[in-house]
Image (cartoon, helix red, strand yellow):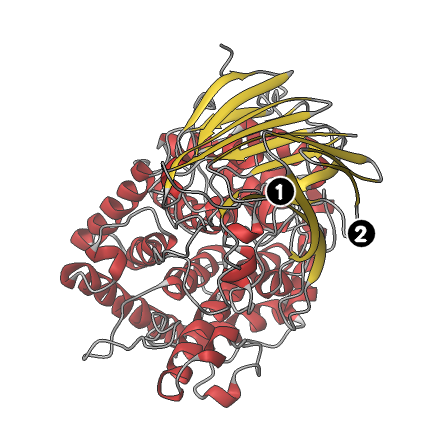
Amino acid sequence: MHVFLTLWLAVAVLPLRSWPALLDAANRDPALQPACRALIAAARKTAQNPPIRRAYRLEDLGKNRTFLDGRSRALEPEIRETFALAMSDMGACQIAAEELPLIAAAFRLSGDQALLHRVLEQLTEMASWSPIQRPGWTLYAPGHRLPPDGKDGNWLATGLGVRAIADSLEILPAGSVPDELRARLDDLLRREIYSIVDDWHTRRSWFISSHNSRTNQWALPTEGLVRACLVLGRDRFQSEYELGVRNLLDSLASDGPAGEFDEGIQYAVFTVTSLLSTARAMAVAGDPRAIEQPFLQNFPTWMMHHLQPGRYLINCFDAFDPSAPRGGDESIEASSHTAVASSLPFRKLLSLIAVSTGSPVARWALAQQFNGPLDDVAGVAVRALPPGAPAAPPPPFGVYPRAPRVNWRDSWDDNGTGVWVRGGSKLDQHDHQDRGHVNFILRGCPILIEAGTPSYDTPDMMSLYASGAGHNVLQIGTVPPPRPGQFKLDEDVRVPGWQKAGCVAPMAVRRLDASQGDIQVDGTACYDGLQAWIRDVSWNAAELHVHDKVTLLKGREEVIQFRWHLGTNDPVRIEGKGSHFTISWPGAKLTLLASTPLTVLQETMPDHTLKPSPWVKFNPNFHTCLVVRSARKVNLLEINTSASQ
């Protein structure tokens, strides 16, 4: 047995310097003047956008750089505005958290008073955002209502808004913020501290009452609490600060020891940015308790194992971006509200990791897998790090027991071969009904894919993307996919013959090394009326083989079928009869050999893997999906599926 457990050795945490110290050092270094000038240019371009103004009425959303969450359209009139305004707070604070530190840093480097004016204008506007996160974020589905007191607790905007303010105040030179504005900001942060503490004391929010410290909804308010205390003085808010630190350490300890995150890569980037920003701020203030946690040290390897050949990303869970190019001209605001092929989230977080932990994997990834860091604060800082010893890449494969999955590629070349296979755990969050899914990229070309994740307000999100219909998994019987709006993914709704939500699917690894893999997934618990579904998957750099054995309960017979989502949007050629078929399209071939006669069909399915669909006005792309069925009702089906070029 050759199994590599992905636990990258922890590295010594660098002595952390503040953002001002790093920026000033870069500004004094002649070799870094191009990087400083690039940051200033990026900030000036960003500063051309007007400040974000908070909307107070539904009809004003979409104005002043606010956005309307499309899910609000399906809500009852009495809750629609409350939800939409709450969600606009999150979007506004997310943009502010990206923009303000960048513009503040550019002012520090250049002394350009126009940049300072732009920062102060936005901070003045934000000083009136009390609370930073308005109630209503829990009203995302019809039938939801606020508690009698009208409060559902601090949420994502809380951490993002406090981050925007705290980073800006740290970076701006002393005396840059007028006393009156600073007093207003301090008063805002003080009220946020008391509000967040009250949430935890009353156990107001669902994630507090259930002690779900793994979710971003726990991490972001925690960031707001810790960082607000640091801005105002942790000695003045000692008990509040310690509550926040306990919550942060709880969150870091609850994630996978090999760097796994239970909500997939997209939410991991969002949440780990918050966790790391908080840990870094603590360490700069002399408190290293969080920055030294193993999860933060090992996360970069898990993160990079999501990058598959062809620049595709492993897009299970709610992973909106299906690919990550090496670089590109990417807009902060666009990336906040559109699903695009973007390297921005990876490059930003890798820079923050490298500066904060000294991770050799993060530094290797920036240099070898992307076009270097961005022209932002962390990007300038990471360029100023001592060169150190050349960082060796991590092995391009790993086994992850938490959020169970095997990730494999034969090399770090873009034109290599890649495979990933999903199991399933009760700890998975933001997951799809994809237990047993097999993905295959052959020499940079996608062969077997999944439907992906468009925006949450996409009509077919739950029926054709997140359900089993969007994945290469088993279906028992011929009941059509759930109708749009029939259920929410986090509900354990029994749709006859379809995979259940949140089920456990154990994985056994027989071999996994640089040349090949051989694993088994047990999807038995994911279906009602099933005695066993065992999927064996083996592969090398040239081909993949899947053996499925499905046995229904004694005395039961049904049509048994599988879907195979193909890496093409063109019709495919289907040849064969009985129990043996060949399916081909340019550059790829599938062969099927079954224990009973088959019916093989192709259909067009919406796609968010080969080419992302825009969020602003949903207009889906499509790919071809193969539906393989037993020709009659049976109790047992064994089928071998092979993929090659």
Image position of 140 with respect to 269: above or below: below
Mark 2 burial class by Cα count in 10 Å: few <14, some 14-19, many 20+: few
Q: CA–CA distance between discs 1 and 2?
A: 22 Å
| Residue type, label 2 | Asp
Q: What is the secondary structure assignment of the residue under circle 1? A: loop
Q: What is the secondary structure assignment of the residue under circle 2? A: loop
Q: Which mark is residue 570?
A: 2
Quadrant location of the C terminus in the rendered image? top right
Image position of 54 with respect to 322: above or below: below
Q: Residue at (48%, 60%) from the top-left corner?
A: 168
Is residue 15 visible in the rendered image? The answer is no
Of pointers 1 and 2, the one earlier in the residue sequence: 1
Q: Residue 146: x and y, percent?
A: 26, 77
Q: Residue 556: x and y, percent?
A: 40, 42
Specify the farthest residue to the top: 1
- Circles 1 and 2: CB distance less than 8 Å? no
Image position of 17 with respect to 105: above or below: above
Between 132 and 410, the one nearer to me in the picture: 410
Q: Which mark is residue 313?
A: 1
Q: Residue 579: x and y, percent?
A: 67, 33
Q: Quadrant of residue 288?
A: top left
